[in-house]
Amino acid sequence: PVPRPLAGKRVLITAGPTHEPIDPVRYIANRSSGKQGFAIAAAAQAAGAEVILVSGPVDLDDPQGVTVKHVESARQMLEQVQAALPADIAIFAAAVADWRVANEGDQKLKKTSAGMPPLQLVENPDILATISKLTDKRPPLVIGFAAETEHLIDNAKSKLARKGCDWIVANDVSPATGVMGGDRNTVHLISRKDGEIAVDSWPVMTKEQVAIELVAHIARSATEKPLE
Ligand code: C5P
């Protein structure tokens, strides 16, 4: 029989970029492809989990056997994440836009002689931090991602503390790595062990292999201590 180490577990995953509207036809976005989050969803599903994937706009097919909620903006993503709780494991792989446009236009902005329209930005909700800090419905295992272009490990360690999650998957997204939009990823798993912060650096792998490894780690930690 196929091993199904996550059978009976409900896994919530975010993936992809978010699109933050400027007006009805324009938006602010980023280069996330959603590939890593989708690969994690497929790997968790293959491991027997019930998977809910909340995805921003991506050019990928929905993984088979996974419930997919398609959203555009960070605020819609937070809403769908909250609606999907409770979960045993939450993995926040989305590249959520940090800011959205405060003065979103109802109509397409026009060129005028008055010059360029000022875009006022306001901060988006931090979905990972919001869910990590829940007291009632906090999933027992909350995993965040840290995409950095410099000081990868140090930034990821402070992110673990600041966001209040249990693990951080840190990856170097400098343009030279080709990680953003590419098929490979080099990650470091940062977790708390006996009050210390542990860093586990993995070799370069495909995003599918990273997903399978991460799911294997989750399954091992779930058998060490029950997630309920
Ligand atoms: O602070 P930073 O954006 O680098 O943190 C990355 C982690 O936080 C990722 O797991 C990402 O999915 C999550 N995040 C979020 N909501 C935001 C910003 C980031 O869930 N508004």
Image (cartoon, rainbow, N blue to C red):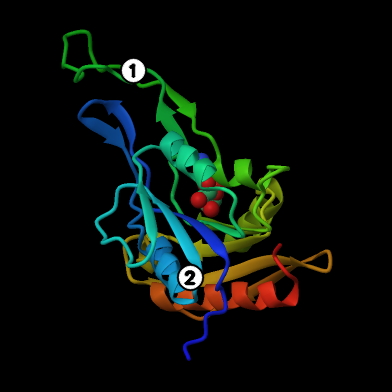
The residue located at (37%, 17%) in the rendering is 103
Dot 2: element: helix
Residue type marked 1: Pro
In this image, 58 relative to 188: left or right? left
Q: CA distance from mark 1 to mark 2?
A: 44 Å
Foreground disc of the pair 1, 2:
2
Front in this rendered view, residue 210 or 178: 210
Mark yes or no: residue 174 visible: yes
Q: Counting residues from the N terminus, which is met first, the one under dot 1 or under dot 2?
A: 2
Q: Which quadrant would residue 116 be assigned to in this image?
A: top left
Report how many numbered discs are placed on residues in the image: 2
Q: Which residue is mark 1?
A: 118
Mark number, residue 144: none
Relative to 221, say whether 21 is above or below.
above
Relative to 113, say whether 123 is above or below.
below
Dot 1: element: loop
Q: Which residue is mark 2?
A: 44
Crowding at mark 2 (Cα within 10 Å: few <14, some 14-19, many 20+): many
Coordinates of residue 49 in the picture (x, y in percent): 51, 69
The residue located at (33%, 71%) in the rendering is 183
Mark yes or no: residue 150 visible: no
User: Farthest residue in the bottom direction?
Assistant: 1
